[in-house]
Image (cartoon, grey):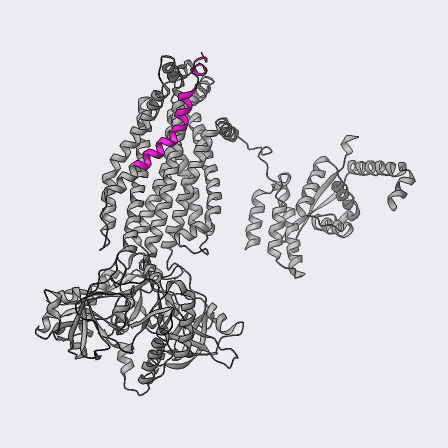
Amino acid sequence: MKEYQLGEFEEIVLLTVGVLYDEAYGVALKNEIEDRGKRRVSIGALQSTLRRLEKKGFLDSKLGEPDKERGGKPKRFFKITAYGKKALIHSKDVRLGLWDSIPEIALDLKME
Amino acid sequence: MIKQLASKFFKFYCHEDYWLDISGDLEEIYRYNLKANRKYPQLRYLIQVVELFRPSLMKSISENSKISNHTIMLKNYFNVAFRSLQKNRLYSFINIFGLAIGLAAFLMINHFVAFEKSYENHIVNKNDIYRVQLDVYQNGELIYKSSENYPGAGPALLEDFPDVISSAKLYNMGSKNNVVITSENGEANPQALKHKRFLYAEAAFLPMFSNQMIQGDAATALEKPFTIVISESMAKKYFGNENPMGKLLRLEDDDFNNELCEVTGVFKDVPENTHLKYDVLISFNTLFARDTRGTGWAQTRYGNGWKRKDFYTYVQLQPNTDPKKLESQFSALVDKYKPENQERNMKDVLSLQKVKDIHLFSQLTDEAEVNGNGDGVFYISIIAFFILIIAWVNYINLSTARAFDRGREVGLRKVMGSYRSSLITQFLVESLVINGLAMLLAFAMIFITTNFFHNLSGTPLSYVIWSQSWFWMLVGGIILIGSLLSGIYPAFVLSSFKPVQVLHGKLRTSSGGVALRKALVIFQFAMSVALIVGTATVFDQMEYMQNRDLGFDMNQTIVVERPPKQDTSRQVRIANVLSFKTGLKQRPEILSVAGSTLLPGKKLRFKTPIRTSLQSQEEAVPLSVAGIDFDFAESMDMKIIAGRSFSEELRDDLDSLVILTENASRAMGFEKPEDAIGKRIEIERFRWSPSIVGVMADYHQENLKEEKPKTLIYLSGGGSEYFMIKINANSASQAITSIEEQWHKSFAGNPFHYFFLDEYFNSYYESERQFKDLFAAFSILAIIVGCLGLFGLSSFTAIQRAREIAIRKVLGSTVLNIIQLLSKEFLILVGTATLIIWPVSYYLMDQWLSNYPYRINIGWSSFLYSGVVVLFVTAVTISYQTLKSATANPVDALNHE
């Protein structure tokens, strides 16, 4: 299922769009990922990933109302498409499958 | 500001569909940062804009629906240009590297020139501000061209002419008197600093010269007496981080003034590029307040008198006033205020000097600093153009020489239906690419050599080349003009080829093209030869000036100025000086100590008419006057050619004897120096009639750009202003320590400063040294660029003539014959260039030298030298190619067909 292929950061962005649901726009996404992931997210990386995901059809977006707090510029809210949802589920399945197949002893050794 | 720029940049590159909401995000983050008081919100904004600079978010050319054939074609032109660059690496390297050197040299020279021309740019009304120059004539002879004026001149101009809207007078005591300023306010370690860069200034001065005040009000800071305004860095030195306003500074000088002044303002340090540099300004009214007994002497001396002339006077005119028109009314003004000129047979001429012209074009007496050399700057900027042209000529030469290579390409393109116009565009784009790349390389060169160049040219590091707007305009201009100039000829030649001929292999470069190439090579090398001759002459002249016998010995001489803080009693002062001198003389590392009112290198300020007692007043000649003590003539190794020097053993008395310099004795009408001995002279000004005890050989009071003065020398006794201390060269540092020790013993409380006489004397050659170094450096660059071109040209000739050479060799030519054959052409060109340019450069250098009263004569050697150097360099440059083709195996060249 090559068309469902997601990069690590792509997956995180896509999931976070899901988490924020109605409020998924640039700054909110950046803050959320930074809070949860304890990592710095450059706005450049985030935006280019968002646009890439949109182009691939995993995301859909629409502009909101002009906002005074933002110098009169509207927010762009993102939403996961059905196709995006499929891709997430696919990616989750692959991971769970992998987790399930790890023999316990392999993890035990790592724990040391 | 940063944010505005960044957001503009963002809008410029960002894809239209994304811009709206992302810029909203940026704004939101920016405002959040502001609210959260995070540091550098603007900078963070900029960083984010840079982070967003990614291809996936940019406007894209390929997605642009409006894309036309033209853009595709343009892309293709660039493609082809880069391919052709890669195809012949050597050619591209020579072209780009040569051009880059040329461009870098051109830009750096312009940097220097721009700096020299940037003087006084910080003054807002610089175009309306003038310094009032004073020329003094006596008996019809010009005796002074002074940068300083009578105290009454400024006020009179302001009052009599409505066009003069402001006048500021500065008393330049710093150059004459010694001043020590000490911080008071009960600190544990009061700072006592000696000041040179200080002036008494009228209140109008601060606003007129656009001083930026950090504290205090420019308009009023200097109004009251005993107020002082200091520079930011001086404030740091005296008060550290404390607020300097209202603090007190004690001013002490060698006129026994001892006053407390209140700090009423702090101004931003004056920039490097101004002719008038100062750290401390004291209110002019302080001078009047010194008239404690109210006799009014200060009013005449500093206020409205027309006697002494030691005030820089600046006036600001109404915008658009014609200074010439105003000047024409000055003679009436002088007549009005100085009616006594008539009977004394004197004439004073006031004139206006544009403040912007002072640095480069003013060489008057008592300039505030050693000014620059306008001619030098002009010559250097001409060199800059020549180097650039030489570099462009390289490009033209190489591209036309390569015509044979490109001919087939052009032919094929034409067969495939290319228009001539698109071929021309093609070659112009190629030239644009090469010029552009060369410019980038030039940037790198400038960047690497920045420090070296600042050193060489004497421009301060704070004058950064990249931050100048002219720089970028010049860069843009050069790339465009250069691409066009150097590209247009090759473009037309190459695009004019007839396809049938070139594809048939019949192309011969036209005789016109060859002739042009030859002419250009001759031009290039003529320039190089001229530059070498120039460099050699400048070097010789410098050498001559620095090594000429000055008439005194300034080696290993340390100079200290008299102490600013002195006892008011004359006896004590004389005793102190005596203790200083005798104390030093006892030490083995000190060879001698002498005092004087003259300092070699510094113009003698004072001139007065002097006659023999047999002559009438009309016959009096203006002589400079200077004082020396008993030790001076012997210590400085000055020659007495008639009579004797002042003598301590003979108990010469201060008031009865003088010495004349040789030209002074001649000017007074003595045929032989011996005739002057024992004659009485009259000095009306002092009501003094001493007799001549000796005649001294002429010496160079100043650097060799100035004539030797006609001087009357008197015995200065205790009133010496300078002490010349000869030291033993082997224990110089020990000597300096001893002088300092003795200084503090004899002149307690005075900061110790010293300098070496030869360094001081030679500092007047600074602009010459700059000129010399720049000339030398850029001559070498010009030759390198020319040689690069020649190298490329010779390799192309060799390739083109490969078959001819092979056939010659097969038929029995020796390697030597071939080398001769190939070298001859170039050597003839270079030789011709040399012969053509010799007379021209002789004329130019003779012109330049005529500015110097003491100059060398241009000898044959520098011409011979320049010719030999250029021919040798040419031979070496082309030898690589000629040897290569001469020793090549003929089979390689012949088996092509």
Q: Residue at x 89, y 43 (%)?
A: A109
Where does the N terminus of chain A fall, quadrant-wise? top right
Query: Is residue B540 shown left or right of residue B270?
Result: left
Q: Is residue B333 visible?
A: no
What is the span of residues highlighted in magenta in the rendered image? B868-897
Q: Residue at x 14, y 67 (%)?
A: B665
Residue B894 on the magenta span: yes
Q: Reply above or below: B91 against B502.
A: below
Q: Nearer the viewer, residue B136 or B889?
A: B889
State the image coordinates of residue B174 (x, y, percent, origin top left).
35, 71
Number of numbered callouts drawn: 0
State the image coordinates of residue B498 (x, y, percent, origin top left).
39, 18
Q: Quadrant of residue B463?
A: bottom left
Q: Reply above or below: B642 against B71.
A: below
State the image coordinates of residue A86 (x, y, percent, origin top left).
81, 36
Q: Is residue B20 visible?
A: yes
Q: Nearer the viewer, residue B664 or B480?
A: B664
**Which residue is farthest front?**
B588
State the image coordinates of residue B483 (x, y, percent, origin top left).
41, 35
Query: Is residue A69 shown left or right of residue B462?
Result: right
Residue B239 on the magenta span: no
State the predominant SS element of the stretch in magenta: helix
Q: Reply above or below: B245 against B811.
A: below
Q: Residue at x 33, y 82 (%)?
A: B575
Q: Nearer the viewer, residue B502 or B634?
A: B634
**Which residue is farthest bottom?**
B293
Q: Nearer the viewer, residue B44 or B846?
A: B846
Q: Reply above or below: B501 against B291.
A: above
Q: Quadrant of residue B432?
A: top left
Q: Residue at x 55, y 51 (%)?
A: B5
